Structure formats: C-alpha cells, structure tokens
Image: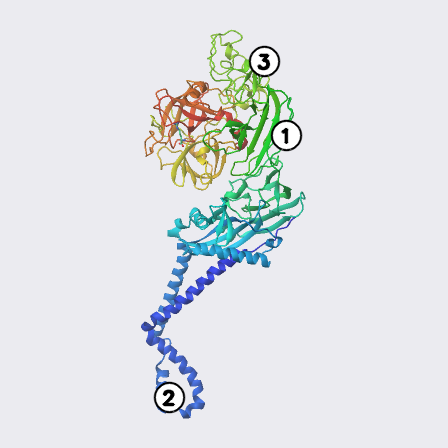
Amino acid sequence: MQNFKVCGYGFFSVLLVFDLRSLLLLFVIIFAYFLCCCKSHIYLSMAKVIYFEVATVDSKLAKPLNHRRPKRKTKLRKKYRKKFNPWNFQNVAALSIVLVVFFVISMWTLLWYFVCNSVVFFAALFRIANVEFIPEYRQKESREFASMAQNIEVVVNNVYRKSAVSKMYKHSVLSDLSSNNDGGILVYIWMIFVVPKAKKQYACEDCVGVILKDSIQTSLVNRTSVGYLYDLPVDFDSIVVNGNFILRKDYFMVIGFKCSNDLYAEQQGVNIYLSATASSGKTNCHIKLFALPGFLIHLSIESIDIEANDCVEDALIVYDSLMPIRSKVLYKICEPFNSSTMSFVSTGNVMYLSFKASLGKKGFTGNFAAIPQERNNILATQNALDYEGYIKSPYFPSFYPPKCNCTWGFRTPRTNLGIALKFYNYELKEKGLKGCDHGWWKINEKMYCGSYVDYQTIFYIASSKSEIEFQCSSKLSDPAFKAQYASYNINKPCPGDHFLCSTGLCIEISQRCNGVDDCNDESDEVFCSTPLKVCDSSNYQHPYFACNGIRDCEDGADEMNCTMVVPCTNITYKCKNNMCIRKRNAKCDGVSDCLDNSDESNCGCGSKSQGKSRIVGGANADDAEWPWQVSLHFSGTLYCGASVISKEWLLSAAHCFGTEKLSDPRPWLAYLGMRVQGNPKFFSEIRRIVVHEYYNSRSFDYDIALLQLKNTWPKSLSSVIQPICIPSIIQSVQSGDKCWVTGWGKKSEGDSESPSILQEAEVEIVSQTVCRMRYGPLSSRMICAGVASGKKDACRGDSGGPLSCPEKSGGKWFLIGIVSWGVGCGRPNLPGVYTRVSKFASWIQNYVV
Ligand code: ARG
C-alpha cells in the first residue's frame, strides 16, 4: 500500500509569502510616505511629542551635567514639561488621524490587491530540443536542475517582462523536467500574473501563449519547428499555455486531506500499487507518475469511490503531462464505473493524476507500470479465409492515447476475395470535409472516419490486397475497439437469400421491409412500399399491422392474441418477468397486459390536466398545458428545452452540452412549470449532466442527454409539473401520426428575439424513407416530423425540448422525440429532425429508476 505524504502548500506558499511580503513592504513605504507628506499638518503636535521624548532622555542625563547647563534652558524645559500633556485633545486628534489614515490606506491596499486583482497561474509546457535528459533532472535539489531552472526562468522572465503584459507578469517557476521520448526534454513551468480585474482580458490564455510563441525565432532555413527563445532551442509546435484559475483554488483553499507524491516505475512491466483514501473532510491529491525514459505509462484504475456530480466536486483526472494542463487531459473519471478496471496509456513517460473529492469516505485504487511503446507498422499479411483473427486498437484493451498510428496489411489468396472487418461497437464512414473525432483511417488510399455505435458493423474492402492505416484523432483517450477479419467474396458479400445492409450486416431477405430495423441503421426499412392491407393470414401478421393498437383488418385479426406469451424477439414487448407479448404499445395504455402487470406500473406520467390541449407557425400554449416542458438557462440565458421524466431527471439533447463550458452543470438552471419566461413555478440547479457516450457532434447521432436536478419538484406542484412517459423500445409511431412540438425557440428562422410565452405547434411524423429523400442518410436514432408546407417546426432555442405524442389507447402522452436539428426552420419539405427516444429506453432506465 502506498501512503501519500501529506504536504503543505509547497512552492505555492512561497509565492504567496513572496506576494504578502511585497505587500508589507508597500505598507511601510506608504506609511513612510505618509509621515513625510503629512509632516507639515501635524508638525506642531509631533514636534512636541518628539521633543517630549528627547527631553525625557535629556532629563535623565541632566543631573550630573546640571552644573554645565545654563539656567535659562532648564527653566524653559521645566516650562515645557509642565505644559506638555500627551493626552491633550490636539495630540489625541493627531494620533487618531494618523491611525485612521493608516488603517484606511492599508484596507484600501488590501482591498485593491485582493478584490480588484486576481492572481492567475498559467501552466506552460514546451520542449527544448538538443538537450538530453539526465537523471539529475528528476531531483529538484540537484545542481543540474537548479541551473536549468535558472536558465529557463531567466529566459521566460525576459520574454514576459518585455511584453505587453509586463505589468501583470510577476515571475515564473520551473515545476518539472521530463524526458521526451522522441528527443529533447519537456519543460513544465508555472507563470504567475497579478491581473487587475478590469484588465482580465489581456491575460487570457491565448494572449499569454501567443507571446511565448511569437518570441521564438524560427529559422525558416532548416524548416523544422524548432526555433530559438533567446539561447534555448524550443520546439514551437510543443508550446501549450493553460490558464489555471480553478487549480489555484484547489491548491490553496482545500482544507482537509491533501496528498502529493512522485512515484517511479523503475522497471519495465512491474506494477506499482496506487491508492488514495480519505475518511472525512475534502480530499485533494496530486500524484506524478514517472517511467524510465523511452517507456510509456500504463495506468489501471481498479476501483473508485466518488460521488457522481460531473467532476465538479469529485473527480479523478488523468493528464498526459506532469502538470494539470487542460489540453493534456487523457480521461476524466467523474463517477464510479461498472467495468472491472479502466486503463489508460500515456504518450510519454509521465502522467499526472489529480484526485479531488468532497466530504466523506472517498478514494481510489489502481496501479501503474512502465510499458514499451507499441511500434507502428504491424504488418499482418494474411491468407484470410473465414474469420481468422483480430485487429485491435493500440494497447488493447486499454483506452488508447490521443496520439498513435498503426498499419495493417492484408493479402487474400484469390483476386475475388476481399477483406471484411467486423467491428463490435465501431463504424467506419467515408470522411467528409470535417475532421474525424474518433480515429482517422486510410484504407487503400481512401479516407474514413471512425465512430462508436452500440451495434455491430462489417466493413468490406473489395480488394485482395489492402493497406490499412489507423491514426488516433480524439482529444481524450478513446475506448478500445477490435475487429474480426475474414475474407469474403467480393461479388457476393452475403449468402444467397440475404440482404446486404449499409452497416455491412447480412439479413434474411424476409427481414427486409418488415417494419423492424434489423440492419441497425434502417437500411432494410427504407424505400419499402406500404404493405397491402390484405387481411389474409400471412399479411395481418406483418409487423406493420400486427398488434400496433390499430384495427387494420375488418375482423380485427391483426389485433388478436397480442397479449399471448410468445418467444422474445426485437418486436415483442418484454414484461418485467422477462416474458414477452406481441402488443407493441402495451406500456401505460391503461390495460394490464403482462401477467405481472409491469406494463402498467410506473405510469404516473403523460397526463395533461388541460383539455385542449415557437416554434415556427405555432400558437401560445395554455397554462400547464405541457407540464413536462422545461426551459434550460445557461448563465442566465435561455439556451435549450428539456422534458421532465421523473421527480429528479430531465431529458434533453446532447448538443446543448457539447462544449467543455456547456457540459459544466453549475451555470445551468432548469425552470419547470413555466408558461411565460420569468414566471416559473419551480426551478432547480443541475447536479449532473449525462451526455450519451456515443453522441457524435458531426452527425448529431445519439443526440440525447439526461440531467439530474439538485432539488426535486414538490408533489404540491403536480397540477403544473408532470413527467412525460418514455416509450418502450418497440413502441410504434407511424408516418402521419400527429404530435406536438413545444418550446420558447425562435418563431422564425430570421428572428433575433425569442417569444416569452411557450409556443406549441402540431406536426406529423414523417416516414424515414421520405425524410431520407430530403436529408440523405439519417441514423435510426433519428425521427422526422413536420408539415409539408414547412411553416410548423421547431427552431433555434427549442433544442432538447419535447416532441409529445398522445397514445391512441389510454390517452397518455409519450416523449417520442427530442428537438435535435433541421435545415433552417419551417422550410417546405425540410422537416425537423428529432432524437428517437424509444431507441434509448434502456439507456434511460440505467439512470432513472
Ligand atoms: N439545433 C436547434 C437548437 O439548438 C434546433 C433546431 C431545430 N430545427 C428545426 N428546423 N427543427 O435549438
């Protein structure tokens, strides 16, 4: 067990002391100045005081010298002594003025220093080329470290003291040196600025970074990124400067358990145990991990005890550096995980762990080891036939780092055989103009982007010879993936009577156009003609008609025997007791269908208290008409909509929280039971935002997020606040079904103002086939709704809000869609695109019980 030594404030306290000392000095100067300046005003009384003291001393000496002194002077002194009273009004007034002025000046200075200024720390990292790392650089007490520190600090001081921010710049301190596996050393420094609040914008991260970058004289001759910062050969491309406002608070303010440690993996492959536990108080640990130069760090986290609150209070953050630099985050663990371990790999031989936790018993355990770098160009030339083996992401099954590169080569025995790659939760799509977020692939000179999905896909390479190159391209570490490879017949990828899905899967021809998404991307369900309503025995069983709650056949045969227990398939309703029935819309329809009655439990949702029941082309909603409608405000501004789905959970769109700033729950407020903006019946802060792990910001796939409220809404408000029902995964909606979209979004595309009254508009579900004709490929997690003329649609500001549809039998309202995207607003033949909520029924259930 590794015990962390409890540390004090380290060198930060030195910085603080340094600043306080200068402050004290300032006071003394001000006081001296004050004495000089104010001399004339209080001269008389001061003179008396001073004289009085001199006289006292003199008088002590006076006796033996008495005979030498002229009598007149002694008389004069006696006169003064008699007359002088230090507590007379004049003296007390003068003293008080001095004290008051001194007090006011001190207070003002303190106030100015701490209120009008902020101390801002910047973490900077760069590579110095042409310097070899020596073991002495690890020891901060060593002469070598000290001389390197002095050299670097002088250079950085020179740069900033001659820059536009020189007045704010205080000094820099070298924090660490590490070896760079590809040559040179990496330098980590803290730069300290005292920034007047009014001038905060001049000390921005980019502004400070640019100064360092601009000071590098790059030599265009040798065309490398290494230039000179005074006499230091610095790699221009390696410079990262990060403002650390939050960190400063972490370092100084946390009272409770603090730990810091430097741990070394001296031998390859030997696991070193890691743990941090705190039983009470706040925890704040900073752990630096080092491996031998040339090696990487493999970190495994085995268990973690923290509260899930989006890393606001509890977090284990893994950095690919020796300092908490934002752009070097490898991964943030914000909540306990279910899997047995989570492991990560660094890109260099160092890692930095920051573990913070609020009150309570918190901690984590794990281990780390030095591992060799996986070499590129793993060339596996295969005679593939049938599934032969796997290609795996680097360092499988660990998360792979943001920087990596692998290549694989395949050769099949015959020219008519290509290579098929079967991925389990990953998909390759042709690369568009935008970059790739989760892996960049070059396959036989063509570019593809990878993304994570929750189903299998098969990628076919129609060539007997293939070269595959994979490059990591995400900001953080990405989860591992693997693909099974096999050869396939280029002319006939699927067996005889099978249909080839766009996901690469082969499905039986009978599954095509059966109303069920068998391909996982609905490629088997588009461009299907509506099945004829011929109510013979073969047709009434068609999933399009059977057990969907609508009597299609005159004799009602299509709706018969729907609650009989049948084997479970992907078109059956699963009761809690794991028995399945064919009735698709069994959930909360007012009829007990499951033997255990589970289809009618938890149905306190989807009831509207109002009878009648911008959105573009909408009308003002009535009071409490859409009791699940939520308005989400970010830093005081209306940003998105959401729906109430339980006492403490809301459902919204992932793209509302798509940036680092927006994914912080603290600036968000949720307004519930509101019709007119500013008049909510209830509001709450957000405890946690769960963005779907497969959300793809480029395609808007998996555009769904859960928000946990800090405070639950009271029962007494249930006439104005109500959850909406979540559809089951097989709940059917059909094109032409009428639903309502609601929100405070723009009333038309060009509007700059948003309406203050909640808007509602009735729209129709548009079939996937028609919608694909308008927009091109859509994922099966999307559903379209609109009206042919356009005119009625959601618009900017409605995102995340509900598309509410009434269930035919039972009359409850279901959240069929979440406002996601569209081209413009309310344009003819361009319907709104919504997140298809039924696809996420079990994902939602994982969080909302
Ligand atoms: N993405 C938009 C938002 O942030 C919603 C757009 C919906 N557009 C549409 N035409 N339906 O509010």
Number of numbered labels in the structure image = 3
* Rendered location of residue 31, percent (x, y): 39, 68
| SS of the residue under disc 2 | helix
Marks 3 and 1, Cα distance to the nearest angstrom? 31 Å
Residue 403 visible here: yes
Comparing marks 2 and 3, which lies closer to the viewer? 3
| Side of 811 where 578 appears, left or right | right
Query: In this figure, which residue is indicated by the disc labeled 2?
Result: 74
The kind of residue tagged 2 is Thr
* Rendered location of residue 849, percent (x, y): 53, 31
* Rendered location of residue 199, percent (x, y): 38, 51
Instruction: Name above or below for residue 229 compared with residue 89.
Output: above
Residue 423 visible here: no
| Side of 334 where 806 appears, left or right | left
Residue in the foreground of this view, choosing between 57 and 229: 229
Query: In this figure, which residue is indicated by the disc labeled 3?
Result: 496
Residue in the foreground of this view, choosing between 226 and 189: 226
* Disc sitting over residue 380 in the figure: 1
The kind of residue tagged 3 is Gly
Marks 2 and 3, Cα distance to the nearest angstrom? 131 Å
Comparing marks 1 and 2, which lies closer to the viewer? 1
Within 8 Å of ligand 1, the CB of disc 1? no
Q: Earlier in the sequence, mark 2 or mark 3?
A: 2
Residue displayed at 41% across by 92% down: 68
Residue in the foreground of this view, choosing between 592 and 757: 757
Q: Earlier in the sequence, mark 3 or mark 1?
A: 1
The kind of residue tagged 1 is Ala
| Colouring method of the image | rainbow
| SS of the residue under disc 1 | loop
* Rendered location of residue 35, percent (x, y): 37, 70
